Image (tube, helix red, strand yellow):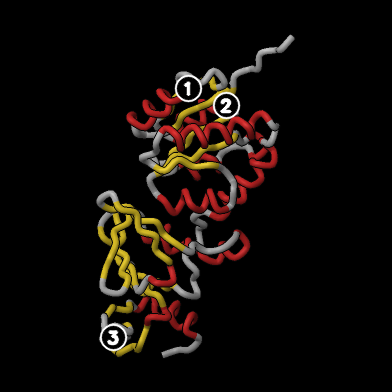
């Protein structure tokens, strides 16, 4: 006689109602999954996790006030569920995939991709791999957006590529090809040769993911690839102008001068 398996408890966390609706609809016919709740923000999700103890978590990375990574850091490492990241921010998704800490769904995802992610997640839960996956997920969390660039040394490799979506096209961008980056409201403008790309990200978070020996903040709104620097010219009251190989001039603020000096290995 075959004993029926207990359905896997799943929690959906996403601040976009349409995304929650899509996940709920796709799970509707899956007898192996029991949805124990839906949450629109990290704080509500923490309470739901405490009360429902889900084994599987569909988690949006970018949410207001508390993002998905920050939320996961609040949980007991020994009790982390299997996580399927849901994100429109590709560098996070790629990083999760690269370290095999969890699966991911890149918005907008199709039905087949969703089924593949759910199938792998169910296998992980059924195989009793929560402990191992929890350790890998903690390693991922420790390596994402550290508070200081130096914290990255022990956490893992720096970001090597960005994936940028625009107008339906996806661009894979090698970080080493970036010339410089400037703040643009809620976005950053990434300059590569004669073109630029917009990415919805903060300067602080992006800087924390880059190798500090290669990318240096020279102004509160400017990060530069030091390998693209051709010369520095005195400007005014201790400030300098950074001249790139392509002739582009960027202002070096006095507050960032010492940092650039330490990377270049000499004072000026």
The structure residue drawn at horizontal position 42% and vertical position 81%, both measured from the top left corner, is 227
**Closer to the eye: label 3 or 1:** 1
Front residue of 2/185: it is 2
**Helix, strand or loop at mark 1:** strand
Q: Mark 1 points at which residue?
A: 37
Q: Distance between the residues labelled 3 and 1?
A: 59 Å
Asked where in the image residue 157 lies, by quadrant, the reply is bottom right
Mark 3 or 1, nearer chain start: 1
Q: Which of marks 3 and 2 is nearer the N terminus?
A: 2
58 horizontally vs 233: left or right: right
Residues at marks 1 and 2, CA–CA distance in whole angstroms: 9 Å
Helix, strand or loop at label 3? It is loop
Q: How far apart are marks 3 and 2 (CA)?
A: 59 Å
Q: Do the residues labelled 1 and 2 touch (CB within 8 Å)?
A: yes
Mark 1 or mark 2: name the one nearer the start of the chain.
1
Residue 50 appears left or right of 177: right
Q: Mark 2 highlights which residue? A: 54
Which residue bears the numbered disc 3?
237
Identify which residue, 146 or 38, lies in the foreground. 38
Q: Residue at 52% x, 57% y: name it.
A: 146
Above-or-below relation of 110 to 160: above
In this view of the protein, can residue 244 be seen by the observer? yes
For disc 3, the neighbor class at 10 Å (few under 14, some 14 to 19, many from 20) is: few
């Amino acid at each position: 006689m075959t004993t029926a398996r207990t359905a896997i408890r799943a929690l959906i966390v996403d601040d976009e109602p349409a995304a929650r609706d899509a996940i709920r609809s796709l799970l509707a016919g899956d007898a192996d999954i029991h949805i124990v709740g839906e949450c629109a923000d990290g704080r509500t999700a923490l309470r739901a996790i405490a009360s429902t103890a889900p084994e599987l978590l569909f988690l949006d990375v970018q949410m207001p006030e508390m993002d998905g990574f920050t939320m996961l850091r609040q949980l007991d490492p020994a009790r982390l569920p299997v996580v399927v990241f849901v994100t429109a921010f590709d560098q996070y998704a790629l990083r999760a995939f690269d370290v095999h800490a969890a699966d991911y769904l890149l918005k907008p995802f199709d039905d087949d991709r969703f089924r593949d992610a759910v199938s792998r997640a169910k296998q992980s839960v059924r195989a009793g791999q929560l402990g191992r996956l929890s350790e890998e997920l903690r390693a991922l969390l420790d390596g994402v957006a550290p508070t200081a660039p130096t914290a990255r040394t022990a956490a893992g490799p720096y970001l090597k590529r960005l994936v940028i979506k625009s107008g339906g096209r996806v661009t894979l961008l090698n970080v080493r090809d970036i010339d410089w980056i400037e703040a643009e409201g809620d976005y950053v403008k990434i300059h590569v040769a004669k073109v630029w790309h917009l990415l919805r990200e903060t300067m602080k978070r992006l800087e924390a993911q880059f190798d500090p020996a290669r990318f240096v903040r020279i102004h509160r709104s400017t990060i530069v690839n030091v390998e693209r620097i051709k010369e520095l010219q005195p400007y005014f009251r201790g400030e300098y102008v950074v001249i790139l190989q392509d002739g582009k001039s960027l202002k070096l603020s006095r507050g960032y001068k010492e940092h650039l000096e330490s990377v270049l290995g000499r004072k000026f």
